[in-house]
Amino acid sequence: MDKFDSRTIGLIKEKGVLALSKSKVAIFGVGGVGGTCLEALVRSNVGQIDIYDFDKVDESNLNRQICFDYFSIGKEKVTIAKEKMNKINPRTVVNAFSLRLDLDNVKELNLSQYDYIVDCIDETSPKIALIKRCITENIRIVSSLGMANRFDPSKVIITTLDKTYNDPLAKLIRNKLRSEGINPKLLSVAFSSELPIKNGTFKGSMMLVPSSAGLSLAYKTIFDLILPYNKQ
């Protein structure tokens, strides 16, 4: 262990740091939620993180997406995110994949290689497909639910899908999983208990709630990755 990990050891001990350094994580979506989660995992010295996103940086992203700045506009999010993470901690191997997840390619990805998957996808169909595959193949996953049109970061918590409320996306996913015989209790999620602010069809967002969700997802990922080592 070296100075980079010195403060981390104070919380999770050397066994925890070693566990993270040997772990391989995938993050799907590196926007407001996923970008903050990514940076937290990189600063925690996770060994390898594969990031998946199809989007390019837009000026409208800059009010909340931690990985990007004005010089990033028009560039691929995964490319910029990887460059930033390499500057923070080059020992974490970050692999960037410019990919729009869909119902076909989600079946082809080698998901079993990962110790943990973090789902920060906005689009409903590929999100559900990823969740279903992970649960049925016993691959650990945590998902972000609706964070738009919310203002209070203290309302974001980690729980299981069956315990969520005030979230239309959660209800949709819950019903879909139940219709296919999958217990919603099997999915860990970050969700906001805050009632969404009504803006018609417009989705308003600031950094507060998405980044709170990103940190919550990182916490859940780290906790589960180090738990077996703490029991030794």
Image (cartoon, rainbow, N blue to C red):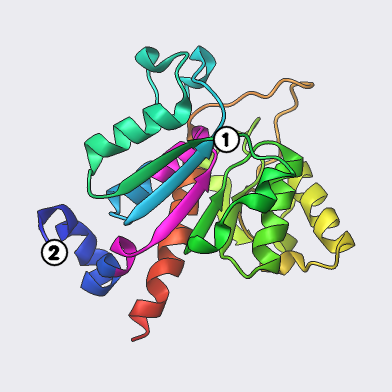
Is residue 26 magenta-colored?
yes
Q: Considering the image in quadrants, where does the N terminus appear? A: bottom left
Residue drawn at x 49%, y 62% is 113
Q: Quadrant of residue 39?
A: top left
Q: Which residue is mark 2?
A: 1
Bounds of the magenta span? 19-38
Q: Position of residue 89 (x, y in %)?
A: 23, 44
Q: Amino acid at mark 1?
A: Leu
Q: Earlier in the sequence, mark 2 or mark 1?
A: 2
Residue drawn at x 41%, y 44% is 38
Q: Please name which of the two marks, 2 or 1, marks the residue nearer to the observer.
A: 1
The crowding category of the residue bearing disc 2, from other C-alpha atoms within 10 Å (few below 14, some 14 to 19, many at least 20), is few
Q: Amino acid at mark 2?
A: Met
For the residues labelled 2 and 1, say whether their Cβ atoms are less than 8 Å apart: no
Residue drawn at x 77%, y 68% is 183
In this view, 133 is above or below 183: above
Q: Quadrant of residue 150?
A: top right
Identify the mark at residue 216; answer none if there is no mark. Answer: none
In this view, 55 is above or below 41: above
Q: Position of residue 48 (x, y in %)?
A: 36, 53
For this orientation, the residue located farthest to the front is: 108
Label 1 sits on a secondary structure element that is: loop
Describe residue 25's horizontal placement relative to residue 13 as left or right. right
Residues 150 and 124: in front is 124
Is residue 193 magenta-colored?
no
In this view, 169 is above or below 53: below
Identify the mark at residue 99; answer none if there is no mark. Answer: 1
For this orientation, the residue located farthest to the left is: 3
Describe residue 104's horizontal placement relative to residue 22 as left or right. right
